[in-house]
């Protein structure tokens, strides 16, 4: 070819002679297995429940003595009919998502499930329609070339209409069941410690990622464990909202809105900047434990669902601990969906290189630059602060109303979430009280109630001195995620001392 001909040839002038369809092999499933921890996989399933207008969701783990059998995510949403369940089981089939839907790519439920388990079964019923069920197995996909099993309606009905805790029996709704869960198969011996840890991870993850829905009570999420060998179900625990932003800011004038624009076509992007108080003990700051510095930076939301919980997307090169107090709340408008791209596993947002340049131009209405905001957050972290009263959990039901009023009106910070409730109930043995951290309840042994009443009538807030003292004495123990051996010993001593005091009172 002559040199002049090389110059005239354009790179996009390539000749097409024909077309050919090349289908993917079933091995494409391995490529779809992105990095999904089990709690993130369950969050993908709960997203579908919210899209189905479910008011209640149950996450249930089935065990048989010391062996974990399967995991189910159950909801009372609108369910699916025969055509809808086929579409739901098809990989990368994008349904017609409504404007507020949490689903995006059409792969979430399948990929999240098959990342964790060899078998995923979906059972459902829509109002006025029949019972339908489908089942994917990894073997069915790889060895039988995308063969999806159709489940019998009678077996689907039997499974839906069994007892599902607070959901009762489902006439309408959906159950997603994982069998041969890989995490379960790696366990040896008693799984109790694993169950407590995985329940903690799931509660923290869902509590954070879906905190806006939980705060608005748009959905209630519970977890429990059923032992199929005995037929007993262990006490359920509720997923509480973990709001990652402070109620009381560290700096006057914050939270502050900054406005950024990548182009006139995309419009304005609002960055709501927060600065946490230094050394906060709030669960919303600690976010379930771990390194708080990992949660500094941008918190991106799509349709009220938290996608990314920390990271600076190039604005700051490292997760410097001195920036730990800075968190920025960003709702991604649909117009920015192509610019700020959500990853398929909904774990992070990819921003182009130009993002940091536009951030540098972002301003608040008072003229503050985004750089000045991050500098202020760093100054607060480095400053030597005044000692403040540590926040306590609010008094809940069972604390006398006049006592509650005094506490709520006092100049003492109160933690977010439900308060501590006190009630009398049956307790095995001679302990004076038991602590239920999951439900934030202090249960008092009713066998001692008559001794303390000394002939007075029982009531919803009787024996107010004991209730008030225990509320303050045990407030700190409710903030612990897991009971340490030292804390257990302290509670045992308090229990023994109270029982001894009760016996003295009875013999007086």
Image: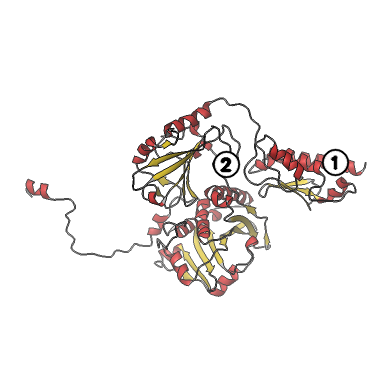
Q: Is residue 289 visible?
A: no
Horizontally, residue 24 falls left or right of residue 464, namely left
Residue neighbourhood size for the residue with mark 2, other residues' Cα within 10 Å, grouped as few (<14), some (14–19), many (≥20) = many
Q: Are marks 1 and 2 in contact (CB under 8 Å)?
A: no
Q: Closer to the camera: disc 1 or disc 2?
A: 2
From the top left corner, tell me how far across and down residue 475 is, in percent: 70, 40
| Residue 363 location, quadrant | top left
From the top left corner, tell me how far across and down residue 498 is, in percent: 82, 41
Vertical relation: 50 (above or below) 5: below
In the rendered picture of this protein, how many numbered marks are placed on residues?
Answer: 2
The residue depicted at 52 percent of the width and 52 percent of the height is 38
Vertical relation: 84 (above or below) 289: below
The residue depicted at 38 percent of the width and 51 percent of the height is 335
From the top left corner, tell me how far across and down residue 324 is, in percent: 51, 34
**Quadrant in the picture for the C terminus:** top right
> Considering the numbered disc 1 on the image, is that residue within a helix, a strand or a loop?
helix
Q: Is residue 44 visible?
A: yes
Q: Residue furthest right?
A: 508
Horizontally, residue 25 falls left or right of residue 66, namely left
Vertical relation: 78 (above or below) 421: below
Q: How is colour applied across the structure in the image?
A: secondary structure
Vertical relation: 415 (above or below) 239: above
Provide the residue designation for mark 1: 500
Residue neighbourhood size for the residue with mark 1, other residues' Cα within 10 Å, grouped as few (<14), some (14–19), many (≥20) = few
Residue 422 numbered mark, or none: none
The residue depicted at 39 percent of the width and 67 percent of the height is 145
Horizontally, residue 417 falls left or right of residue 319, namely right
Whole-angstrom CA distance, mark 1 to mark 2, is 39 Å
Provide the residue designation for mark 2: 284
Q: Nearer the viewer, residue 408 or 397?
A: 408
């Amino acid at each position: 070819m002559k040199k002049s001909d090389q110059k005239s040839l354009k790179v996009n002038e390539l000749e097409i002679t024909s077309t050919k369809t090349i289908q993917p092999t079933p091995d494409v499933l391995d490529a779809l297995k992105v990095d999904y921890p089990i709690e993130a996989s369950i969050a993908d399933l709960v997203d579908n429940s919210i899209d189905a207008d479910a008011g209640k969701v149950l996450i249930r783990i089935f065990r048989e003595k010391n062996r974990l059998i399967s995991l189910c995510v159950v909801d009372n949403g609108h369910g699916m009919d025969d055509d809808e369940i086929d579409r739901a089981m098809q990989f990368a089939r994008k349904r017609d998502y409504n404007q507020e839907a949490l689903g995006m790519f059409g792969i979430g439920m399948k990929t999240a499930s098959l990342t964790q388990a060899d078998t995923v079964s979906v059972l459902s019923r829509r109002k006025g329609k029949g019972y339908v069920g489908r089942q994917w197995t990894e073997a069915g996909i790889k060895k039988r070339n995308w063969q999806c099993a159709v489940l019998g309606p009678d077996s689907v009905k039997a499974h839906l209409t069994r007892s599902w805790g607070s959901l009762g029996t489902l006439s309408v709704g959906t159950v997603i069941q994982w069998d041969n869960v890989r995490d379960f198969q790696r366990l040896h011996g008693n799984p109790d410690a694993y169950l407590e840890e995985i329940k903690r991870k799931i509660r923290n993850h869902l509590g954070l990622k879906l905190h806006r829905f939980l705060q608005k009570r748009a959905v209630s999420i519970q977890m429990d464990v059923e032992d199929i060998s005995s037929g007993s179900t262990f006490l359920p625990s509720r997923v509480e909202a973990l709001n990652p932003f402070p109620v009381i800011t560290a700096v006057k004038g914050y939270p502050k809105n900054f406005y950024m624009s990548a182009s006139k076509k995309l419009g304005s992007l609002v960055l709501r900047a927060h600065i946490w108080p230094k050394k906060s003990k709030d669960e919303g700051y600690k976010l379930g434990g771990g390194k708080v510095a990992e949660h500094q930076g941008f918190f991106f939301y799509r349709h009220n669902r938290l996608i990314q919980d920390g990271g600076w997307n190039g604005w700051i090169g490292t997760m410097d601990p001195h920036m730990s107090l800075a968190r920025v709340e960003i709702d991604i408008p649909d117009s920015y969906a192509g610019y700020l791209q959500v990853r398929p596993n909904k774990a992070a947002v990819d921003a182009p290189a130009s993002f940091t340049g536009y951030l540098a131009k972002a301003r608040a209405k008072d003229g503050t630059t985004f750089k000045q905001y991050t500098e202020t957050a760093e100054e607060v972290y480095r400053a030597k602060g005044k000692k403040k009263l540590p926040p306590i959990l609010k008094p809940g039901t069972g604390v006398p109303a006049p006592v509650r009023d005094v506490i709520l009106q006092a100049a003492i910070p109160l933690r977010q979430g439900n308060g501590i409730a006190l009630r009398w109930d049956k307790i095995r043995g001679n302990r004076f009280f038991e602590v239920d951290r999951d439900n934030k309840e202090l249960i008092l042994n009713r066998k001692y109630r008559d001794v303390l009443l000394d002939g007075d009538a029982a009531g919803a807030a009787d024996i107010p001195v004991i209730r008030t003292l225990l509320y303050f004495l045990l407030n700190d123990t409710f903030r612990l995620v897991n009971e340490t051996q030292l804390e257990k010993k302290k509670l045992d001593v308090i229990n023994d001392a109270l029982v001894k005091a009760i016996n003295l009172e009875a013999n007086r």
